[in-house]
Image: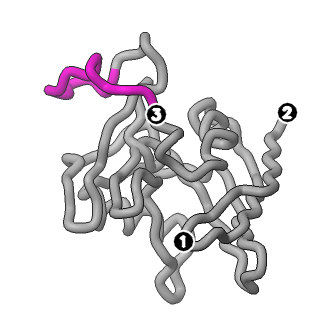
């Protein structure tokens, strides 16, 4: 399997690699927002399935962030770089081939670069790849412009 993260691809923003994300529009469900953001920022459509929920808390802030995580095993359209994002493919293991019909050589893809992602991603992202529904919470301390994880909890169905 290879990954391009929204539950299949990672994108490069000014701050570094991260998951596709966006805010809810008024009256929009998390699933509708995820589909809209995926189309707006990567130019693809996908049958998304709910894969997990995360709560991010920053010590001293009065707001917590609830994040719904979605995944898809297939998509329609051509993954396209936009003004906001540059999608990048990464392999999730060394043996499974990438999406059939792709013209790129997937053997050149690097492993998922957890060292360039949020520090808590290494704990829940493997659950996403295994298709295990999960819930979790990550608490961060603010250190200038950086966020340092100080506590985290993740759980799955057995």
Q: CA distance from mark 3 to mark 2?
A: 26 Å
| Residue 137, image quadrant | bottom right
Q: Secondary structure at mark 2?
A: loop
Residue beneath the point at 46% across and 70% down:
22
Image location of residue 151, percent across then percent down: 81, 55
Which residue lies under the disc numbered 3? 112
As drawn, 108 above or below 142: above
Q: Residue 48 or 23: which is nearer the viewer?
A: 23
Image location of residue 134, percent across then percent down: 73, 46
Q: CA distance from mark 1 to mark 3?
A: 24 Å
Residue beneath the point at 74% across and 58% down:
138
Image quadrant holding the N terminus, namely top left
Q: Secondary structure at mark 1?
A: loop
Which residue lies under the disc numbered 2? 158
Tell me the mark number nearer the camera, choosing from 1 and 3. Answer: 1
Which residue lies under the disc numbered 1? 145
Q: Coloring scheme of the render?
A: one colour
The answer to whether 133 appears left or right of 47 in the picture is: right
Task: Assess whether mark 2 and mark 1 are in contact (beta carbons under 8 angstroms).
Answer: no
First reached walking from the N terminus: tag 3 or tag 2: 3
Tell me the mark number nearer the camera, choosing from 1 and 2. Answer: 1
Q: CA distance from mark 1 to mark 2?
A: 38 Å
Image location of residue 32, percent across then percent down: 47, 69
Residue beneath the point at 33% across and 36% down:
89
The answer to whether 2 appears left or right of 57 in the picture is: left
Q: Looking at this rendering, what residue extends furthest in the left direction?
A: 103
For the record, the magenta segment spans: 98-112
First reached walking from the N terminus: tag 1 or tag 2: 1
Asked whether 150 falls inside the magenta stretch, the response is: no
The answer to whether 118 appears left or right of 75 in the picture is: right
């Amino acid at each position: 399997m290879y990954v391009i993260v929204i539950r299949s691809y990672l994108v490069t923003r000014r701050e570094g690699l991260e998951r596709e994300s966006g805010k809810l529009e008024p009256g929009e469900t998390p699933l509708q927002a995820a589909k809209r953001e995926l189309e707006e920022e990567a130019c693809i459509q996908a049958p998304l399935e709910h894969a997990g929920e995360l709560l991010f808390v920053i010590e001293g802030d009065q707001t917590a962030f609830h994040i719904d995580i979605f995944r898809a095993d297939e998509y329609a359209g051509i993954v396209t770089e936009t003004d906001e994002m540059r999608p990048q493919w990464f392999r999730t293991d060394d043996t499974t081939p990438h999406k059939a019909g792709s013209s790129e050589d997937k053997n050149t893809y690097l492993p998922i670069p957890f060292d360039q992602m949020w520090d808590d991603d290494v704990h829940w992202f493997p659950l996403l790849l295994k298709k295990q529904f999960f819930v979790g919470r990550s608490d961060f301390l603010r250190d200038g412009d950086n966020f340092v994880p100080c506590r985290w909890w993740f759980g799955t169905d057995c």
